[in-house]
Amino acid sequence: MSKPVLGILGGGQLGRMLALAAARLGVRSRVYDPAPDACAGDVAQLVCGSFEDESALARFCAGLDVVTIEFENVPVRAAEIAGQHVPLRPGLESIAIAQDRLHERGVLGRAGFATPVSEAIDSLQDLRDAVARREKPLLLKTRRLGYDGKGQAWVRSVADVEPAWARLGGHPLLLDQGVRFDREISLVAVRGSDGTTVHYPPIENVHREGILWTSRAPAPVDAKTLALARRQLEHMLDRLGYVGVIALEFFETGGLLLANEMAPRVHNSAHWTVDGARTSQFENHVRAVLGLPLGSTEARGWAGMLNLVGTAPPLERLLEDESVHVHLYGKEPRAGRKIGHVNVCEADERSREARMSALGAILEGSNAHVRGAG
């Protein structure tokens, strides 16, 4: 019997970790990316080509059992072409939804989630009118292609209207009411091809300048609030016929969860699962898209993740602590670029916090946190 072959559109660190998880199951991976130095190419077959090259995409799909994505901004047409040759999981509708924030908010709202107050902005006059009548602050963001804080501008007064428009005008825009939140929470789930859905523990996240800095799990969330959010998520996944891992990002304010964004893929906030859960998000995604039984999402203890952004301490320094799990992506250091992460797994919350505090000091000292991201 030949080994299954998983196709991955996108060759970044998420594709790399998917390929590593697939290899543990005896599954080969083939990655498609425009960059000849895409880091997933270190661990999987890399096919280099433009996402606009339909012939190259068709050749890439030859012999695959299934194809998936590793970032939500894979051009919809590229995903559509791949899906004409081999099963595409998650499906085209889910990918398209996540590429337009306005469409995404509508889908989240119809699933029953509360979301930040928002409206479409199509002109400078639209922006002026909205700012004049709405409570500030407001966050102007591009409806497409924004990530890690890019494509956003705060509007705190009428004086910010012109600069914000000069920065982002020309793109379809969304204007959000600023949210004074207590915490940022993500919920990560995986739905199998048979409709079975399992959930990872809630995750608390801290961002710096729009880039994820740390994640902690399990995060304490009110049981009734969590159960409702999971039911709403399952309802949305069932309607979409979704297959694979999905992440929803929330603002928690006064005990209420406001759904902000969805990511139809494996997610940075669940990187801790590689070392801290019985089955990682990456392995469960591979299992789901190949129609295999899902693994346990139970946390092994108290886990934390710290991103390595821009630069990293010497590897020897990180490896001095045998309880720290280091994951480097093979990417060249650059301001604002995620080049790796470290996971901490402890038996109790206090030990985890002490370990993360010590690691944070090391990363601060090595200039590994976000400085001059852009």
Image (cartoon, rainbow, N blue to C red):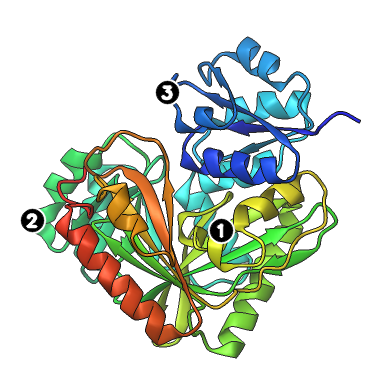
Nearer the observer, 368 or 224: 368
Alpha carbons under labels 3 and 2: distance apart: 43 Å
Q: Residues within 10 Å of mark 1 (few under 14, many from 20)?
A: some
Determine whether, in the image, residue 344 is placed left or right of residue 128. right
Position of the N terminus, as image quadrant, is: top right
Q: Position of residue 338 (x, y in %)?
A: 34, 46
Describe the element under mark 2 as helix, strand or loop: helix
Residue topped by disc 3: 37
Nearest to the eye among marks 3 and 2: give it.
3
Q: Residue furthest left?
A: 159
Alpha carbons under labels 3 and 1: distance apart: 24 Å
Q: Residue furthest right?
A: 1
For the residues labelled 1 and 2, say whether their Cβ atoms are less than 8 Å apart.
no
| Three-letter amino acid code of the residue under disc 1 | Val
One can see residue 253 in this view: no
Residue occupying the point 8% across, 56% down: 159
Alpha carbons under labels 1 and 2: distance apart: 46 Å
Determine whether, in the image, residue 252 is placed left or right of residue 167. right
**First in sequence: mark 1 or mark 2?**
2
For the residues labelled 3 and 2, say whether their Cβ atoms are less than 8 Å apart.
no
Q: Position of residue 16 (x, y in %)?
A: 53, 39
Residue occupying the point 21% across, 69% down: 136
Nearer the observer, 374 or 236: 374
Residue topped by disc 2: 159
Q: Identify whether 162 is placed above or below 303.
A: above
Residue occupying the point 44% across, 87% down: 255
| Three-letter amino acid code of the residue under disc 2 | Ala
Residue topped by disc 1: 274
| Three-letter amino acid code of the residue under disc 3 | Asp
